[in-house]
Image: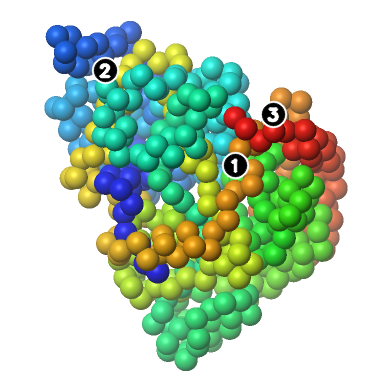
Amino acid sequence: MRRTSRRKGNGVLTIIIILVGILIGYGVLNKSIITSSSTPIVDGEIDTSRYVKLSMLLAGPPSTEAIMAYKDSIAQLNNKLKDSINANVEITYIPFDEMGREYPKIFSSKETYDVVYASSRAHPGYFKLAEQENFKELDELLPIYAKNIWANINPAVWDDAKYKGKIYGIPLEDVKYRANSFIYREDLLEKYEMEPLMSLEDMKEFMDNLLIDEVDITPIGINESSAIRLYDMLVDLNADWIPAPGLPQSSLYLVSKSKDNITDILFPVFSNEFMEFAKEMKDWADKGYWQGEALMDDSTIMKNLDSGKGGSIFGNIFDYSNGFLDQNLKFFCFGEKNQKVIKESAAKNLLSISAESRNAERALMVIDFIMNDEELNSLITYGIQGQIFKGIKQKDMLDYYESISIEDPYAKFTFDASAVEEEINNVIRINSQYGIPILLGKAGDPVTAVNKYREKLKAAGIEKIIDAVEEQLKTSTFVY
């Protein structure tokens, strides 16, 4: 079950979500210049005679090293854009681990942008932002200014991302599954004469072997921004829990109590399973499965796995747009055993264009250009994730996950968070301050830490959020 790029150029657009910290920082966004020009049709041709400077506000890793490494690549991109469509792109990013706190500020403070990352699972969500007229309707523009995108994306995928029958976002992927996994080296598995890993106990045995015999190998490459993957593992290994709306999935999120009753909501932090997991993670940290205070940045994690200094990483294998370069990698997908590999809605990962953008047409042309330029595809697809992800065929993997996947039961539900905005922001802050250290085994005694975390969550209003989600789920028609 290996994979390569999906449709032509898809990896490029996916990596735009990853390769976003290139030219300017978040605070500079207000200074981005959006010109007063449009891109008209003149004598049947698109007129790009006026130079346009565009701003893109996206989500990505916090790695300064990665940002510096790809400045030249983005400069090359802009050279191509200048020659082809007379445009320049300034890319600003919010780190993945800051999304829950910083993303809402973009819309509450009316930041200026042309293109922005949007998601039905973000806060605020894509459908709510479309309802509030933050985004430009694209139906009439796409066939003219983004012909390749319009032709290459499956009509069913467009339908999946529509709000009230209209397109307000460009899907980043034809199909994606929630396939959170432990990705590890097959050569080490063979060295210790182990069978493929299928449980937490198997993972621990694998990592214990590395601690004993491989002094130069870090068992797991992980950092604070990827710690949410540990929470994903907890959720996916539970037979009943399905990720639910209410809190963004960039933070610790809500779940259904049962796959069969998705209107009953739980915050796993208040479960016995979370308490036991906190103890387990403290044990993992104390053993040295990851590097304690010397947590690595994203690019170092990838480089170490590639070079042999790392033994494993956590990740959704469908986030790696072009598969694995080295077939010496295997993965344990947490959701397979309980048949919980979720086929995600196209509305989970989109690019939208500001309703206030004066250059929506040119913005579409830029996105279309990046998706369909072969050289840029090769240049950017491998991007920040390094050279370990590329070149392996994916069809078998796609067919396999399609055969075992379940539909996201919340795909057609839009949570209205307006009555609990303050509580959501408070909980996101508490999750970051108390939850992430617990997941990383850095919060001291786990029982004391979890109990304090729970108290803080109650004070922040978690119960009010859960009540709001449950009430809306029980009265919703699940359509958008």
- The amino acid type, in three-letter code, at marker 3 is Asp
> By what rule are the colours in the image chosen?
rainbow
**Badge 2: few (under 14), some or many (20 or more) residues near its Cα, within 10 Å?**
many
Is the N terminus in the top left, top right, bottom left or bottom right quadrant? bottom left
The residue where tag 3 is placed is 416
Q: Is residue 282 visible?
A: no
- The amino acid type, in three-letter code, at marker 2 is Val
Of the image marks 2 and 3, the number of the one nearer the N terminus:
2
Foreground pick, 119 / 340: 340
- The amino acid type, in three-letter code, at marker 1 is Ala
Q: Which residue is drawn at 52% across and 19% down?
A: 134
Mark 2 and mark 3 residues within 8 Å of each other at the beta carbon: no
Of the image marks 2 and 1, the number of the one nearer the N terminus:
2
Q: Which of marks 2 and 1 is in front?
A: 1
When asked about the image quadrant of residue 104, the answer is: top right
Where residue 223 appears, x then y in whole percent?
53, 57
Q: Residue at x 76, y 26 (%)?
A: 419
Mark 2 and mark 1 residues within 8 Å of each other at the beta carbon: no
Gap in angstroms between the C-alphas marked 2 and 3: 36 Å
Judge whether 218 appears above or below 470 on screen: below
Where residue 133 appears, x then y in whole percent?
54, 17
When asked about the image quadrant of residue 279, the answer is: bottom right
For residue 52, the mark is 2
For residue 411, the mark is 1
Q: Nearer the viewer, mark 1 or mark 3?
A: 1
When asked about the image quadrant of residue 172, the answer is: top left
**Badge 3: few (under 14), some or many (20 or more) residues near its Cα, within 10 Å?**
some
Q: Which of marks 2 and 3 is in front?
A: 3
Gap in angstroms between the C-alphas marked 1 and 3: 14 Å
Q: Residue at x 73, y 48 (%)?
A: 262
Describe the element under mark 2 as helix, strand or loop: strand
